[in-house]
Amino acid sequence: MIVRDIKFKDLDAVYNLLNQLKFVFTHQVDKRKAWDEFNGEGLVVEHQDKIIGFGSLVVENKLRGYKSGQLEDIVIHQDWRGKGVGELLVKKLTERADELGCYRVSLFCREELIPFYNKNGFDVNNVVMKRFKK
Amino acid sequence: MIVRDIKFKDLDAVYNLLNQLKFVFTHQVDKRKAWDEFNGEGLVVEHQDKIIGFGSLVVENKLRGYKSGQLEDIVIHQDWRGKGVGELLVKKLTERADELGCYRVSLFCREELIPFYNKNGFDVNNVVMKRFKK
């Protein structure tokens, strides 16, 4: 099992995986445009030539010169959950954040995932609020 | 009172304002570099040639081609709180997110700010977890 940077050729597999997190119709997505505009650091978990995990890190360059990171769209294939794959992926994403100089990494999650992220060095800090476009 | 895009010349005033949110030593910050690398949309509230509010919007271009926005570093000068300045600023930032095509806007906040953001169209959604660099 390896964790590596996503490549353009992984997109279909990753789209399928992301549909296990949140379903989106992707057959009309301009993949080349989406790839060129994507502003995250995307990592995939590959096992025997199959993509079984994906997650991304978004780096914000703050106005006062420092950087902060945010984990987004962490998903492990449903057949591979509970086997340490997510832990490996989160470890690699936070290492990447460290390498890029982020002073902290944040993420949003549902309450039932708190123990998982606690184990991986994250603590609850504030609430997330969202406003959806009307 | 107007809300407009931040300019380089506003940096000192905005740094002072941000220190009311979280104190950071900024005298050694390379302002030109920080400005060039800043990857948010920064808005200031100006009143009689003084900067009394700041906030930024970070746009994430997702791998599946859509965009999501996040509000960061919203601060109103302490002498100007409770006068509707924050509401105006949040309104302009969410309008900017709409213009840029974000399907949603998220933010982190302390629990005591939930009523303020509720009034402005935001609802609590999940928890935030953070991991600080060791």
Image (cartoon, coloured by chain):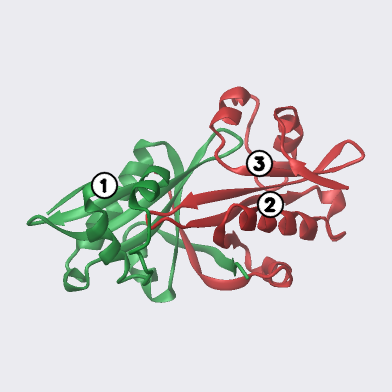
Chain colours: A green, B red
- Residue A6 visible here: no
Measured as percent of width and height from the top left, residue A125 is found at 52, 61
Q: Chain of mark 2?
A: B
Residue type beneath disc 2: Ile
How many labels, in total? 3
SS for dot 1: helix
Residues flagged by tags 1 and 2 on a common chain: no
Badge 2: residue crowd in 10 Å (few <14, some 14–19, many ≥20): many
Q: Chain of mark 3?
A: B
Q: Secondary structure at mark 3?
A: loop
Spatial distance from mark 1 to mark 2, Cα to Cα? 36 Å
Residue designated by label 2 = B74
Mark 1 to mark 3 CA distance (whole Å): 41 Å
Tell me where residue A115 appears, x and y as whole percent.
Answer: 35, 70
- Front residue of this view, candidates B113 and B47: B47
Q: Residue furthest bottom?
A: A112
Q: Chain of mark 1?
A: A
Earlier in the chain: of badge 3 and badge 2, it is 3
Q: Residue at x 43, y 48 (%)?
A: A58
Same chain, marks 1 and 3?
Answer: no
To which quarter of the image does residue B42 belong?
Answer: top right
Above/below status of A81 relative to A33 = below
> As shown in the figure, which amino acid type bears the numbered disc 1?
Phe
Mark 3 or 2: the one toward you: 2
| Residue picked out by circle 3 | B23
Contact? badges 1 and 3 (CB < 8 Å)? no
Residue B78 is marked as none
On the same chain, marks 3 and 2? The answer is yes
Residue A79 visible in image: yes
Numbered mark located on residue A8 in the image = 1
For image coordinates 40% across by 58% down, the residue present is A122
